[in-house]
Image (tube, helix red, strand yellow):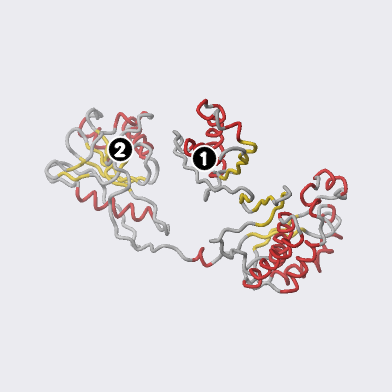
Amino acid sequence: MGAKCAPSYANLFLGEWEHYVFSAEEYEIYLPHVLRWHRYIDDIMLIWQGPEKLLQEFVAKLNVNKFNLTLTLNYHSTRLEFLDTEIKVDKDGQVSTNLYRKKTAGNSLLHAQSMHPYRCIEGIPKGQYIRLRRICSTDEDFKREAYDLYQRFKLRGYKTRCLRRAYQHALSLNREDLLYKCRKSNIQTSSPKTQETTGLVLTFNTNDKEIRSSIYKHWNILSKDPTVGKLVPSCPLFSYRRNTSIGDSLTHSHFQPQSRTTCCKTLGSYKCGACEQCQYIKVSTYFGNGKVNYDMYHYTCCTTTHVIHLFTCHCGSKYVGKTKRPFKRRIYEHMRDISNCNLLSAIAKHIFCMHNGHYAGSYFQGIDRLHGDIRGGDLDNKLLHSYLEDSESCTNKGHGHLNIQPKLKIC
């Protein structure tokens, strides 16, 4: 249950399974023996009134299902463990409850020296003792489990005074109030808020006590202000965001062997199929200058950014370009220059001077692309280096080369 959505998916899945169990005819002979059926996510508590062999047969049939579920059966005539509660029935038929801990359970309590607000550290023992008071039905069980809890807290560095205060507070509470306390009574007895509380969010650090003291000391300056005083209460409500931990500072090594292959299995230049520039792209998995061909090691289409592209005229002349924007945007600009007879463009100048404006049979290819580095960096400068390498590869003495030599930035 690591993901946040896991409990919701588990409840939906097991809810469908339960609906199937209680509606299928093959289980009709077993269901009358089920007095109680309670489920919490994937844990089921079942009270069975019938033969033991019939119960085992029922669970065996439940394990043969189309949901790929396997149930583990643990049963006893007078004792039952469900979640963190142990339910017992004595000889007189009286039901009692006690805390249940698995044999493999460890001491996972938050350490007292952990970097958390002191109210959070002091609130953990209070909450744990109140939970223990609510689960244990007798004072003897509560005191015995409270001593075990005290030992676990001491191993985690908690002070005796804090633990004794939390224990005495839980012992003074009435267990029935913890079980049946109505929320409506809290709403009625609580005092109405005359002014909304102002939250002050800080990044928690070891100087928290001094910061709070300084803010409390000078808060009256804001309260006495004629404008701001109407917006702030008599005292702020402090809340904290998590500070940077050691785990945030540590990371995986960025020195990985360089490889031009990507996780995409489909390599080559393709059309997106949803724009007007698709008609000018040639679907291919290699490019070349007529004598030597090169395989493409990346997937590119009209929407790909940081692309090295190759324009091939119908006469065989080639132009290698680069763009940080989507590939289709650069194709559109080249075709617009041809339509507007922009002689400042190398492609448009070649089309009009050599072919009188006819470009039928010419096409574009995305021959290379760059992926963003985890450390950032000047991706445009890296794109320029790749552009020069691919431009040299496509140079052909037998055909024209339309590129103008760019100015190379030195890293």
* Residue type (three-letter) at the residue carrying disc 2: Leu
Residue highlighted by disc 2:
343
> Closer to us: mark 2 or mark 1?
1
Q: Residue at x 61, y 61 (%)?
A: 242
Q: Position of residue 202 (x, y in %)?
A: 68, 61
First along the sequence among labels 2 and 1: 1
Instruction: Identify the residue position indicated by label 1 in the image.
Output: 53
Q: Nearer the viewer, residue 281 or 116?
A: 116
Please give left or right for residue 390 compared with residue 136 in the image.
Answer: left
CA neighbours of label 2 inside 10 A, class few (<14), some (14 to 19), many (20+): some
Q: Position of residue 172 (x, y in %)?
A: 82, 61
Query: Image height check: is 36 above or below 179?
Result: above
The quarter holding residue 304 reads: top left
Residue found at the far top of this picture: 25
Vertical relation: 242 (above or below) 185? below
Q: Is residue 163 left or right of residue 285?
A: right
Q: Identify the residue at horizontal 62%, vertical 38% (top origin).
A: 49
Quadrant position of the C terminus in the picture = bottom left
